Amino acid sequence: MNSQYVVAKFGGTSVANFEAMQRCAAIVHDNPDVRVVVVSASAGVTNHLVTLTQQKVDAAEREALFQSVMTIQQDILACLTLDTDLQAGFNDTKEAFYALAQLPALDAQQCDEMLSFGERFSSYLFTQVLRDLGVTSSRFDVRQVLKTDRQFGKAVPDVAATRDAAMAHLTPQLSEQVVVTQGFIGSDNQGQTTTLGRGGSDYSAALLAEAIAAQSVHIWTDVVGIFSTDPRLCHKARPIARLSFDEAAEMATFGAKVLHPATILPASRSGISVFVGSSRDPHAGGTWIEKNNRSEPGIRAVTQRKNQILLTLKSPEMLLASGFLARIFTILSAHNISVDLVTTSEISVALTLDNAPNATRPELAQACLDELGEFCQVSVENNLTLVAMIGSEIQLRHGEASLMQVLADFNIRLICHGASRHNLCFLVEQGESDAVVQAIHSRLLEAA
Ligand code: ADP
Ligand code: ASP
Ligand code: MG
């Protein structure tokens, strides 16, 4: 049985500066059911921290990056007076950040430690903004409860351990006050800091909502919901009022950056509603993703994910032999590689992988290519984009003529359709992908 509690998550632009934080604090103040607040690093901070983890950065650049991060925090701090408990924690965090920023080379665990500072700073500052608005609140270190494995850079949460720790340390506090905590970060079983991958604060919010059996999770960002495509790309994109868990999960997976790909998982598993809205315009509505939302047949949205790698593996010896795919996937799995699309023929298999810039770790290691190369020809192509049409019961004959006409103008590399009734995906050259999305949106989503 779920409680009345709501988990509210505020993304990087929502906590970018003092005024933005004040708008978010007002949202919390106005909804007494909000008991857990999850904050991201202020916009731009995590990118600086990612650069700080890179080996090629010299001492002068490290100092400049440290200063850039601290300037963003100080600009907010200039509008606040931190209570003594928060001031002490903030100072300690700054010292730890400074010490780590001196090191010329970091191991994987230290990289995650470095990446954690943005969320840690935001949580001190946001707690004070809430207190100044009269909301009884305290800052909570999420690493006490959000338990993960040790895959630094992209750690996998331990749902049972997180729930047990939340029941012991977090839930008892919620009847008394609002708890402000960090997105994106967690800790392993030795208490060392881990991170969930870029954009992971949405996922943290959903995991915490599950752990405290919340009624819903509210993702406050810079757009009034999930749109039919990225509104930055098509000005005619429209917000979608209701989505089913399946459709929302597909949209997040295939590139609607508005939600981290894994966000829907805990919510749908535990029947927790998800709302996506704009912290700039909280009364403008947004998207509700709920268990009982029915998906209407047809295409609802088009998304894109840039920087895809197409890996083609070919082995004529495998004609009529068995075990080829098993061997490939064993190697990929040993290297923790997550594959998105797969198409096969008798002697070859093509796979797509993500290669996002600013990712916290590279997806495709040379060691993995070498192992694959021992038994097949390997070809790697970069600079591709995965375009996905999302909806329900999508069939190629839905608007077949117009879809084929739209695509005829472009060079399509690979098509995947059929494994899920909720998507139809293909790869295009990155340079063409914005135009492909705009063409599909205009022909198939604006006409209705
Ligand atoms: P936050 O910092 O709040 O986590 P993000 O930048 O991660 O915010 O996600 C919000 C952005 O996602 C929007 O500004 C928008 O440009 C982009 N976006 C991409 N696809 C969509 C979509 N289908 N609907 C809404 N926003 C989208
Ligand atoms: N600050 C992290 C990032 O920029 C996590 C997040 O904002 O969701 O990736
Ligand atoms: Mg985000």
Image (cartoon, rainbow, N blue to C red):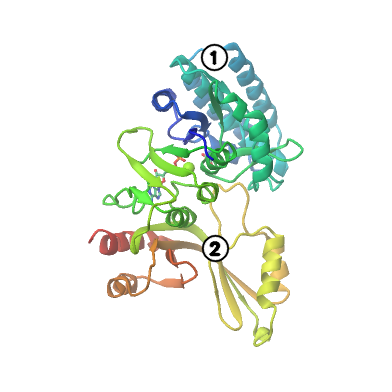
Residue nearest the viewer, comparing 355 with 217: 217
Q: Secondary structure at mark 2?
A: loop
382 in relation to 43, above or below: below
Residue 69: image location, x then y, percent: 55, 29
Q: Amino acid at mark 2?
A: Asp
Residue 34: image location, x then y, percent: 47, 29
Tell me if residue 143 can be seen.
Answer: no
308 in relation to 29, above or below: below
* Mark seen at residue 223: none
Crowdedness near tag 1: few (<14), some (14–19) or many (≥20) residues, C-alpha within 10 Å: some
Report the side of 12 relative to 283 (left or right). Answer: right
Q: Residue at x 41, y 42 (%)?
A: 275
Residue 152: image location, x then y, percent: 68, 45
Q: Secondary structure at mark 1?
A: loop
Crowdedness near tag 2: few (<14), some (14–19) or many (≥20) residues, C-alpha within 10 Å: few
Which comes before the other along the chain, label 2 or label 1? 1
Residue nearest the viewer, comparing 20 with 312: 20
Q: Which residue is mark 1?
A: 82
Mark 2 and mark 1: Cα distance apart in space: 45 Å
Residue 395 location, quadrant: bottom left
- Image quadrant in which the C terminus is located: bottom left
Q: Which residue is mark 2?
A: 340
Residue 55: image location, x then y, percent: 67, 43
**Residue that extends furthest to the right in the rendered view of this protein:** 190
